[in-house]
């Protein structure tokens, strides 16, 4: 029997939830909020939330703007700050984009230019 569509999605979510709970040393049936509380100490979680809130708010604000008025530079700056914060708290591993965002953006533009020339 193979699962398709929403049934597969629900199954995979529940499977990953149980797997994370087992790694955290919790019971197999645990709600996502309880898992998040167990994963991050309370003072650290509070400081992370305080730092994340303005970044997410700025990204949301830019996302609700018209294409003419939105600023890609603001989105990139907020994304880099968000990534650095996640790396700092050990949620995300260090990547090339974290070390030098300008060089990473340049590499992406060059790759897109080469792709357009081929087509």
Image (cartoon, grey):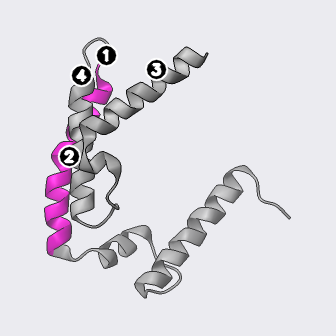
Position of residue 111 relative to residue 46, above or below, is: above
> Residue 48: image x %, image y %?
18, 61
Counting residues from the start of the chain, the first of labels 2 and 3 encountered is 2
Quadrant in which residue 107 is drawn? top left
Residue position marked by numbered label 3 in the rendering: 113
Q: Which residues are magenta?
A: 43-66
The reply to whether callout 2 and callout 3 are in contact (CB within 8 Å) is: no
Q: Can the viewer see residue 56?
A: no
Question: Cα distance, mark 4 to mark 3?
Answer: 22 Å
Q: Residue at x 32, y 64 (%)?
A: 91
Q: Residue at x 57, y 63 (%)?
A: 13
Question: Cα distance, mark 2 to mark 1?
Answer: 23 Å
Residue position marked by numbered label 1 in the rendering: 66
Question: Cα distance, mark 3 to mark 1?
Answer: 26 Å
The reply to whether callout 3 and callout 1 are in contact (CB within 8 Å) is: no
* Label 1 vs label 4, nearer the camera: 4
Quadrant in which residue 76 is drawn? top left
Counting residues from the start of the chain, the first of labels 2 and 1 encountered is 1
* Label 2 vs label 3, nearer the camera: 3
Label 4, residues with CA under 10 Å away: few <14, some 14-19, many ≥20: few
């Amino acid at each position: 029997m193979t699962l398709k569509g929403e049934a597969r999605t629900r199954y995979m979510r529940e499977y990953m939830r149980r797997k994370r709970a087992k790694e955290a040393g919790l019971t197999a049936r645990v709600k996502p909020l309880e898992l998040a509380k167990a994963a991050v100490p309370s003072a650290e979680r509070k400081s992370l939330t305080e730092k994340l809130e303005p970044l997410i708010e700025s990204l949301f604000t830019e996302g609700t703007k018209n294409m003419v008025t939105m600023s890609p530079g603001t989105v990139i700056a907020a994304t880099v700050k968000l990534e650095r914060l996640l790396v700092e708290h050990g949620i995300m591993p260090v990547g090339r984009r974290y070390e030098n965002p300008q060089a990473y953006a340049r590499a992406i533009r060059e790759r897109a230019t080469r792709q357009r020339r081929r087509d």
